């Protein structure tokens, strides 16, 4: 027997089709993986050099909040982005996922609720289940570019159980980059209702069309209520390093988060050594800037290709590297499975992330998929072509 808690834990809508993908690839099918946010751009050399050139004789535990020199390097990095943080306001975590889980544990009471615009990053559902809390969806729509609702609508969603408002900026999965007005609106609702305002800023640099993302710590008056989740996975193309950050200026919040970090002992030492060396090297920040330029070109190619597929609808993303697409199908989950198990064009197909898993509201997102534009432009063109051919066959079947 297993626990009821374990039995009720949600599966990942992004990874649940992996066994089908592995089977298809074992049979020789070439799959274009647009289902997962794994950049294909090489990790900067100086990150690896920080590991291979280190003088470590024993790979020991690092301090629970992270190596002091890494936290100081992060202070400089955040300062470069106009974010004023001190080293003792930063805790290094085992990826952004642990930072998110810590935020749920510390900001919310058991049985509490966190307001989150949907569609949202799917792992938030897992964080809520693990911490004994609930996601309370804030409606948003592609018709208005997934904008945050007005203050009254947000305020009306606050209940006696609400402990926090969570924004992902830029957004995974919509690519929405919240404006200063939207962030200030969220801040005001948080302050008026004594909530924490948590922002997931993992895709900070991935903003296009000459714009920039604002951080929670660039808002006035949020010091005691603000919590930032961050990760180096995307900006350095080091998803396997598992180095994240949780930051706050709220001392009680930090003390509680530190106790959680002590319970799991320490964040990965090797990943921290790589990060320290990269941030102190000549590759920073040019390697990140070049990566972002490449993703902007990929976005533009994908939008041009998808726009030509009959019956497909979407909102132009301003950041991150995801596109939520409404397909001319009733069940995108079934379509995504069918593409992996049955559809073949020149022995190729595409892996997509079904959209329903990015929603808490039953029935929403059933005709949607999330596309990650993490492949090179030629592969994106071919993947879009395959989606168009598959839709013509699927809808005619």
Image: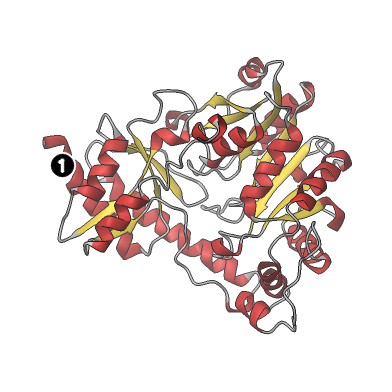
Quadrant where the C terminus sits is top left
Q: In this view, does 222 lie above or below 275?
A: above
Residue 86 lies left or right of residue 175; in this view the side is right
Q: Which residue is more in the foreground, 326 or 184? A: 326
Q: Position of residue 111 (x, y in %)?
A: 67, 23
Q: Name the residue under label 1.
A: 392
Which residue does the image show at 30% across and 50% down from the upper left? 20
Which residue does the image show at 35% across and 30% down from the upper left? 366
Q: Which residue, as the protein is rendered here, is positioned at the far left?
A: 397
Q: Which residue is more in the foreground, 170 or 229? A: 229
Would you identify the image quadrant in which residue 251 lies? Answer: top right
Q: Which residue is more in the foreground, 71 or 292? A: 71
Which residue does the image show at 28% across and 58% down from the upper left? 31
Would you identify the image quadrant in which residue 64 lies? Answer: bottom right
Q: Where is residue 137 in the image (x, y as percent from the top left)?
A: 55, 25
Residue 288 lies left or right of residue 389; in this view the side is right
Q: Where is residue 206 in the image (x, y as percent from the top left)?
A: 55, 55
Q: Residues within 10 Å of mark 1 (few under 14, many from 20)?
A: some
Q: Position of residue 58 (x, y in %)?
A: 74, 78
Which residue does the image show at 79% across and 52% down from the upper left? 262
Question: Is any part of residue 17 visible from this angle?
Answer: yes
Q: Which residue, as the protein is rendered here, is positioned at the far front?
A: 1
Q: In this view, does 377 lie above or below 220?
A: below
Q: Is residue 6 above or below residue 261?
A: above
Would you identify the image quadrant in which residue 106 lies? Answer: top right
Numbered label tally: 1
Q: What colour scheme does the image use?
A: secondary structure
Question: Is any part of residue 387 visible from this angle?
Answer: no
Residue 183 lies left or right of residue 177; in this view the side is right
Residue 60 lies left or right of residue 395; in this view the side is right
Q: Is mark 1 on a helix, strand or loop?
A: helix
Q: Which residue is more in the foreground, 67 or 369? A: 67
């Amino acid at each position: 027997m297993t626990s009821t808690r374990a039995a009720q834990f949600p599966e990942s809508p992004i990874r649940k089709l992996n066994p089908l993908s592995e089977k298809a690839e074992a049979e020789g099918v070439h799959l274009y993986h647009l289902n997962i946010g794994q950049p294909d751009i090489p990790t900067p050399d100086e990150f690896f050099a920080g590991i291979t050139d280190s003088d470590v004789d024993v790979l020991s535990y690092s301090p629970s909040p992270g190596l002091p020199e890494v936290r100081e390097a992060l202070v400089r990095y955040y300062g470069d982005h106009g974010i004023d943080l001190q080293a003792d306001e930063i805790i290094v975590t085992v990826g952004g996922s642990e930072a998110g889980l810590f935020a749920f544990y510390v900001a919310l009471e058991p049985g509490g609720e966190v307001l989150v615009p949907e569609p949202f990053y799917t792992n938030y559902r897992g964080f809520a289940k693990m911490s004994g809390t609930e996601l309370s969806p804030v409606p948003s729509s592609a018709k208005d570019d997934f904008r945050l609702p007005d203050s009254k609508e947000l305020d009306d969603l606050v209940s006696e159980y609400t402990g926090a408002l969570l924004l992902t900026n830029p957004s995974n999965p919509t690519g929405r980059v919240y404006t200063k007005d939207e962030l200030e609106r969220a801040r005001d609702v948080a302050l008026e209702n004594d909530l924490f305002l948590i922002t997931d800023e993992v895709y900070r640099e991935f903003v296009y069309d000459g714009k920039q993302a604002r951080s929670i710590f660039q808002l006035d008056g949020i010091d005691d209520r603000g919590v930032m989740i961050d990760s180096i996975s995307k900006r350095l193309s080091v998803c396997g390093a598992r180095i994240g950050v949780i930051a706050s200026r709220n001392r009680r919040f930090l003390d509680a988060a530190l106790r959680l970090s002590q319970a799991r002992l320490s964040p990965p030492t090797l990943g921290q050594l790589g990060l320290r060396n990269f941030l102190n090297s000549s590759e920073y920040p040019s390697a990140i800037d070049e990566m972002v330029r490449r993703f902007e070109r990929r976005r533009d190619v994908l939008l041009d290709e998808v726009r030509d597929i009959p019956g497909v609808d979407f909102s132009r993303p301003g950041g991150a590297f995801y596109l939520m697409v409404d397909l001319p199908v009733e069940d995108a989950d079934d379509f995504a499975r069918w593409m992996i198990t049955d559809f073949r064009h020149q022995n190729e197909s595409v892996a997509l992330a079904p959209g329903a898993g990015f929603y808490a509201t039953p029935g929403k997102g059933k005709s949607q998929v999330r596309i990650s534009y993490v492949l090179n432009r030629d592969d994106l063109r071919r993947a879009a072509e395959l989606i168009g051919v598959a839709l013509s066959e699927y809808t005619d079947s």
